[in-house]
Amino acid sequence: MNIFRFAGDMTHLTSILILLLKIYATKSCAGISLKTQELYALVFLTRYLDLFTDYVSLYNSVMKIVFIASSLAIVWCMRRHPLVRRSYDKDLDTFRHQFVVLACFVLALVLNEKFTIQEVFWAFSIYLEAVAILPQLVLLQRSGNVDNLTGQYVLFLGAYRGLYIINWIYRYFTEDHFTRWISCVSGLVQTALYADFFYYYYISWKTNTKLKLPA
């Protein structure tokens, strides 16, 4: 494992910790898309089907468990926690994510590296992760104002994907048989979706004003 992948993992973990901090400290999930969180939970559950069959390293197994457990915990809090769920605004979170799931699954059946159950679900998780942030970005645009913790959560999510792109470039030039083209293309698409958010986050930071996204 190279330093870019490790930095990406830590950035991803930081984004999740920021979101958990927001939920548990404020007992609120205002500004957070439940649909995005459900998509991420589905991403991790389908990507890590090999958790109990293919052992790579202790680090690898721990990170898989952490991502699965934390994503399910967030979904549970937003759906079931008596205080947190009251702050969820379903009127703003209206993105039809079921169509995204269906489209990604069909794409995984057609474009995969090997037509096996595990590889098809792996490809599905990669495609789904690339667009899982869409409900969150749509919600933020509709709400207008973005609180600091929510903004930092999305920022670290985007930074994680950016670091993973550097990781793939590094692996392409240092490994003889690096062929994860699905990850590379999907990662570029995912990073592009963050471009607008990054721009307004930078403007907010530069002018020292509250982050606002245009409707």
Image (cartoon, rainbow, N blue to C red):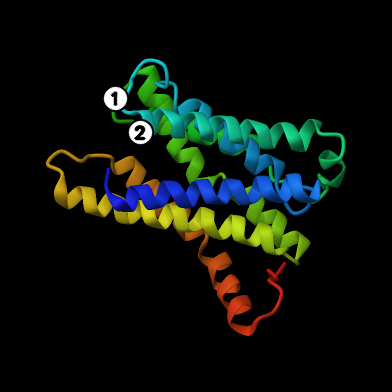
Along the viewing direction, whichever of 48 and 89 lies nearer the viewer:
48
Circle 1 sits in a helix, a strand or a loop, which is it? loop
Confirm whether residue 68 shows in the render: yes
How far apart marks 1 and 2 lie (CA) works out to 9 Å
| Amino acid at pointer 2 | Leu
Residue that carries the numbered disc 2 in the rendered image: 111
Rendered location of residue 170, percent (x, y): 23, 53
Residue in the picture at 71% in, 41% down: 34
Q: Position of residue 190 (x, y in %)?
A: 47, 52
Foreground mark, 1 or 2, reads 1
User: Of the numbered discs in the image, which one, if any, rests on residue 114?
Assistant: 1
The answer to whether residue 199 is left or right of residue 180 is right
Labels 1 & 2 near each other (Cβ < 8 A): no
Pick whichever, 60 or 42, lies toward us: 60
Toward the top, the furthest residue is 53
Mark 1 neighbour class, 10 Å CA radius: few under 14, some 14 to 19, many 20 or more: few
Q: In the rendered view, tell whether residue 142 sits above or below residue 67.
A: below
Task: Give the percent coordinates (x, y) of residue 203.
Answer: 59, 79
Q: Is residue 98 above or below residue 158?
A: above
